[in-house]
Amino acid sequence: MTETTRRDEIAAGLAKVEAEIAEACRAVGRTRRELTLIAVSKTYPASDVRLLAELGVTDVGENRDQEASAKARECADLGLVWHFIGQLQTNKVRSVIGYADVVHSVDRPRLVAALSQEALRVGREITCLVQVALDGDPARGGVPPQDVPALAEAVAGSGGIRLGGVMAVAPLGEEPSRAFARLREIAQVVRDAHPGADAISAGMSGDMSQAIANGATHLRVGTALLGRRKPFVR
Ligand SMILES: *Cc1c(COP(=O)(O)O)cnc(C)c1O
């Protein structure tokens, strides 16, 4: 496939996503400016990230450090905001802090401590979102809703990192609107305690509109922009 047609393909995906966002905003009286579109580029090459940037995308998301760090290095000239959205082991924190501006997957005190320590060491300020396990099962990352306030407090009280808000993935087998409505309530509790922490990272290719209707501020969209990913083989 030539670079030109890949560009057309991504441009078409982006136009469709923007149309869906516009429609979802219109439906609930929100404006596009309230939303940040994060292009999730995992499994796709740095050349796609470059095309996304040419098409006006400013924010990209990745979920695996090894892949993300290489891509961020190749795309360092683009001035993009890099979002780390995957489960994060503490032994990867040093690397992630090297390129990520926002970490969406903060889900335990030990990770907060590691992020803080490394951010302070290198003199960067990293925005952290507390990932919420909306089904109460932390197996796929995230803390149960009842543990969110304490973890938010830990982030807010740590140097080098700032509390940005909350993140979640809609649980399988539940209507996304219901799940995102709960996330919105949890986000409100966090914001009441920490007024600057107003980010709600929710909504993927399949549930963008439901997320927008429930107050999302950050959409993490991969498939709808770049196409279906090949099954990942480790
Ligand atoms: C892969 C991924 C996305 C993007 O999912 P799509 O369905 O491809 O839009 C969003 N959030 C997280 C945490 C992901 O891992």
Image (cartoon, rainbow, N blue to C red):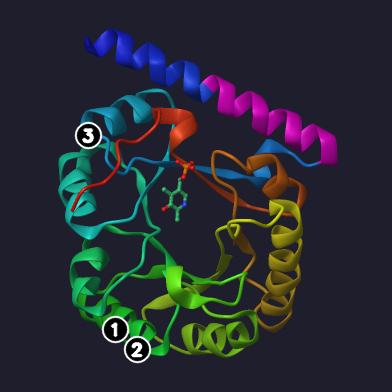
Q: Earlier in the sequence, mark 3 or mark 2?
A: 3
Q: Within the magenta stretch, is there residue 19?
A: yes
Q: Residue at x 51, y 84 (%)?
A: 156
> How many numbered badges does the structure rendering display?
3
x and y, in percent, of residue 24 in the image: 74, 35
Ligand 1 within 8 angstroms of badge 3 C-beta = no
Residue 24 seen in this snapshot: yes
Q: Residue at x 72, y 46 (%)?
A: 210
Q: As shown in the figure, which amino acid type bears the numbered disc 2?
A: Arg
Quarter-of-image position of residue 95: bottom left
Tell me the element at label 2.
helix
Quadrant location of the N terminus in the rendered image: top left
Q: Residue at x 24, y 13 (%)?
A: 3
Q: Of 107 and 38, which appears nearest the observer?
A: 107
16 horizontally vs 138: left or right:
right
> Which numbered marker is on residue 114?
1
Give the residue at mark 2.
Answer: 110
Give the residue at mark 3.
Answer: 45
Quarter-of-image position of residue 83: bottom left
